[in-house]
Image (spheres, rainbow, N blue to C red):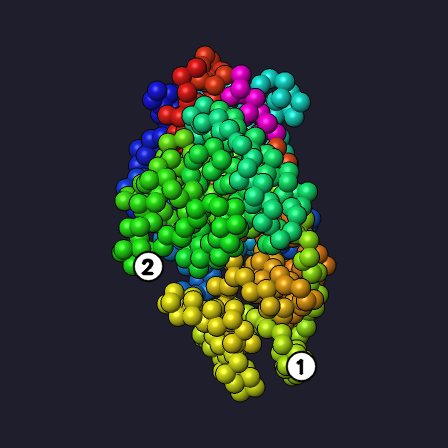
């Protein structure tokens, strides 16, 4: 079905609006970030929310107009004092008064006589602007509005303030917004009457008018009914889209698997420890998904070191019992190799065929592996996304496990599961994601959470120190390394930067070499994969005692003997990053320590961050704090990855609405999966309005 015609006025190019020329249209297209080759539309203007309001309702006498206040005065114009000839930087002054006092209006570089025309001597004008003082006299410099008494109604007493870009004036934007509002069509209502009544929400059109042309400042507040309604609409459109993706993924296209229990029993016996409550619970949920007719689409969330890989192995072993294969996909070869090292001995013990497939393999070896996959002898393959390139054929792929999800959007999820026509999908992430974000980005997936750490993991002592204590840190480090410990030293940058006063990894490496000699090595993201691998191997083999690194080690490096983590310039890292880095130690049997070195002065946010890390090791608690301190876009590194950014909803204020939106979207699609009838049309209108038309083809017929 194509877009309803009623929406045409909102989808016209801004060019077609009176007063918008090529230059302004191009500027707005850039400002609103329209997709390649498309122009900004009327809808973009509507969705561009004000950041605040100017209140001009204070209509007082000159005597009660105070410094820095915005006031609206009715003035009698007395005389003009233009600048002397040849001194253009002297302002044009207009002297005026009302019954309570005198006021000057000041205009800089006012050529062409327009000031005299706007403010004729002897007449009265309403003037609105901000009060300042000059030589003890009250004045308004460049008033925002000057109107004749009979045109007072045209003066906007409550005026929204918009985020602007270079070359775009707020007058021009306000004028455009009003034109678009005038052409706003009547839309069908997609929120049930009782929901609207309960929250006291206006209709979509009324809400838009209240936000863009408020009669009083309270109407435009973020927590006012109008803005709440619009935020809910945006979340609701997003949740319906995710639910549609889910129903497409899960649409009874799975295979109901049957398990014998023999391979999983052998894997269980081979494990050096018993599974935690959380792991057992996750395995049960995953098996239930795989046994059902529907395709599995599940997110497995667990903090660093919570044992996700073992849960994945139990799932892959169960899949092997049903006669199908599994693929485990990691973001880098380093991580794929590491997963393989963990899994291989357990698979061997249980008699499961497990192979590693990377891009760097000799051709003959690669051919052998591909033959095993195509013939079905191999049950489990581990690799990078190269697993899903053409040329890799599976005999019967039943389960895809993806590690480190957040580099991995909704589109990739859909593309990936096409390789195995009926494959179940399990996604593992070590970034504890707060519930709100799970709903916004993974609302199409069921979620299992591992909260506790595996038995035998040591708590990590975390301390916060100023870099001024460098000498003490070094001597303590010498003692510990002398006792056989290994340590990481992390710096935020590879090499020095002229803009940031930050010690780089290269400089720190040079300093530490003077003390530790050949026992220290450097690893960073600009090195070749082979060079990185070599250093990491020497560190794993305990040939190196100290590893200086940038954040390349944040994800997935496993060196159980390393028990000390020093993070320099800790104030420059986000909470999630600090937590991930700290999780690289505490993996062996000895007590581990994490030292956060900071450089003064510390901002309040940085202080709060370091305090949070020091006080808790619970990744979920840390993630919730991170969301409060940083806002949502950064927690998942989503600024770059095309995750849904919000224009109307402000997560800090509207976050509670997402739960409602999630439940409502589920209910709507359960009751009306084909979105048919008037109610369905209203929902489709909502999806078009929020540019979710990608989801429209996914609506199943009935």
Earlier residue among tags 1 and 2: 2
Tell whether 30 sits left or right of 200. Answer: left
Q: Is residue 558 above or below residue 266?
A: below
Which sits in the foreground, 149 or 223?
A: 223
Q: Residue 663: x, y in percent?
A: 59, 27
* Quadrant location of the C terminus in the rendered image: top left
Q: Is residue 183 magenta?
A: no
Which image quarter: residue 211? top right
Give the number of callouts.
2
Q: Is residue 647 above or below residue 113?
A: above
Q: Is residue 269 in view? A: yes
Instruction: Residue at 50%, 16% (x, y): give it.
Output: 672
In space, the residues marked 1 and 2 are separated at their CA atoms by 41 Å
Magenta stretch: dominant secondary structure? helix
Q: Which residue is disc 1 drawn over? A: 479
Instruction: Residue at 60%, 39% (x, y): give it.
Output: 282
Q: Is residue 301 in view? A: no
Q: Secondary structure at mark 1?
A: helix
Q: Residue furthest bottom?
A: 514
Instruction: Residue at 65%, 55% (x, y): give it.
Output: 67
Which sits in the foreground, 166 or 67?
A: 166
Instruction: Residue at 48%, 46% (x, y): give it.
Output: 351
Range shown magenta: 660-671
Q: Is residue 331 above or below residue 571?
A: above
């Amino acid at each position: 079905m194509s877009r309803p015609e009623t929406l045409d006025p909102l989808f016209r190019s801004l060019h077609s609006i009176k007063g918008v020329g090529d230059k302004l249209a191009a500027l707005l297209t850039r400002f609103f970030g329209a997709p390649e080759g498309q122009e900004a539309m009327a809808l973009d203007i509507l969705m561009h929310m004000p950041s605040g309001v100017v209140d001009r309702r204070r209509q007082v006498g000159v005597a009660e107009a105070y410094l820095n206040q915005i006031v609206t005065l009715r003035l009698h114009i007395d005389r003009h004092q233009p600048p002397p000839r040849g001194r253009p930087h002297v302002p044009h002054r207009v002297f005026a008064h009302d019954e309570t006092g005198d006021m000057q209006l000041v205009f800089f570089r006012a050529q062409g006589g327009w000031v005299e025309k706007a403010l004729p001597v002897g007449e009265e004008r309403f003037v609105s602007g901000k009060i300042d003082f000059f030589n003890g006299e009250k004045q308004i410099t460049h008033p925002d509005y000057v109107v004749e008494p009979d045109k007072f109604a045209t003066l906007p007493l409550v005026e929204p303030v918009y985020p602007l870009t270079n070359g775009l004036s707020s007058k021009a934007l306000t004028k455009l917004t009003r034109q678009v509002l005038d052409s706003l069509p009547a839309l069908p209502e997609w929120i049930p009457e009782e929901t609207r009544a309960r929250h006291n929400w206006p209709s979509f059109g009324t809400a838009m008018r209240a936000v863009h042309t408020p009669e009083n400042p309270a109407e435009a507040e973020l927590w006012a009914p109008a803005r709440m309604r619009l935020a809910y609409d945006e979340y609701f459109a997003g949740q319906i889209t995710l639910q549609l993706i889910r129903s497409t993924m899960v649409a009874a296209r799975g295979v109901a698997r049957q398990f014998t229990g023999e391979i999983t029993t052998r894997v269980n016996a081979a494990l050096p420890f018993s599974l935690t409550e959380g792991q057992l619970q996750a395995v049960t949920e995953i098996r239930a998904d795989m046994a059902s007719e529907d395709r599995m689409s599940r997110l497995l969330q667990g903090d660093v070191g919570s044992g996700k890989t073992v849960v994945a192995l139990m799932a892959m072993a169960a899949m092997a019992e049903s006669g199908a294969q599994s693929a485990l996909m990691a973001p880098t070869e380093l991580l794929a190799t590491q997963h393989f090292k963990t899994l291989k001995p357990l698979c061997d013990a249980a008699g499961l065929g497990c192979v590693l497939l990377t891009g760097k393999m000799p051709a003959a070896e690669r051919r052998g592996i591909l033959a095993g996959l195509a013939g079905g002898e191999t049950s489990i393959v581990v690799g990078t996304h190269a697993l899903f390139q053409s040329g890799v054929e599976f005999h019967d792929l039943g389960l895809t496990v993806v590690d480190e999800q957040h580099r991995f959007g909704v589109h990739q999820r859909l593309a990936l599961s096409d390789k195995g026509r009926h494959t179940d999908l399990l996604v593992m992430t070590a970034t504890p994601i707060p519930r709100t974000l799970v709903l916004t980005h993974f609302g199409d997936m069921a979620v299992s959470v591992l909260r506790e750490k595996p038995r035998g993991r040591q708590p990590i002592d975390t301390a916060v120190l100023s870099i001024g204590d460098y000498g003490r840190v070094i001597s303590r480090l010498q003692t510990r390394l002398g006792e056989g410990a290994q340590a990481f030293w992390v710096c935020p940058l590879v090499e020095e930067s002229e803009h940031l006063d930050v010690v780089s990894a290269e400089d720190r490496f040079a300093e530490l070499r003077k003390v530790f000699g050949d026992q220290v090595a450097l690893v960073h993201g600009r090195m070749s994969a082979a060079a990185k691998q070599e250093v990491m191997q020497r560190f794993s083999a305990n040939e190196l005692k100290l590893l200086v690194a940038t954040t390349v080690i944040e994800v997935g490096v496993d060196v159980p003997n390393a028990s000390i983590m020093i993070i320099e310039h800790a104030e420059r890292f986000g909470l999630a990053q600090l937590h991930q880095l700290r999780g690289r130690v505490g993996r062996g049997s000895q007590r581990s320590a994490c030292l956060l070195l900071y450089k003064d002065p510390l901002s309040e946010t940085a202080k709060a961050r370091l305090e949070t890390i020091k006080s808790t090791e619970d990744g979920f608690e840390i993630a919730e704090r991170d969301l409060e301190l940083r806002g949502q876009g950064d927690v998942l590194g989503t600024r770059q990855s095309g995750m849904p950014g919000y224009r109307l909803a402000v997560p800090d204020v509207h976050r509670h609405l997402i739960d409602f939106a999630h439940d409502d979207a589920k209910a709507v699609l359960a009751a009306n999966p084909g979105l048919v009838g008037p109610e369905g049309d209203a929902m489709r209108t909502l999806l078009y309005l929020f540019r979710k038309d990608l989801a429209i083809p996914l609506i199943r017929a009935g």
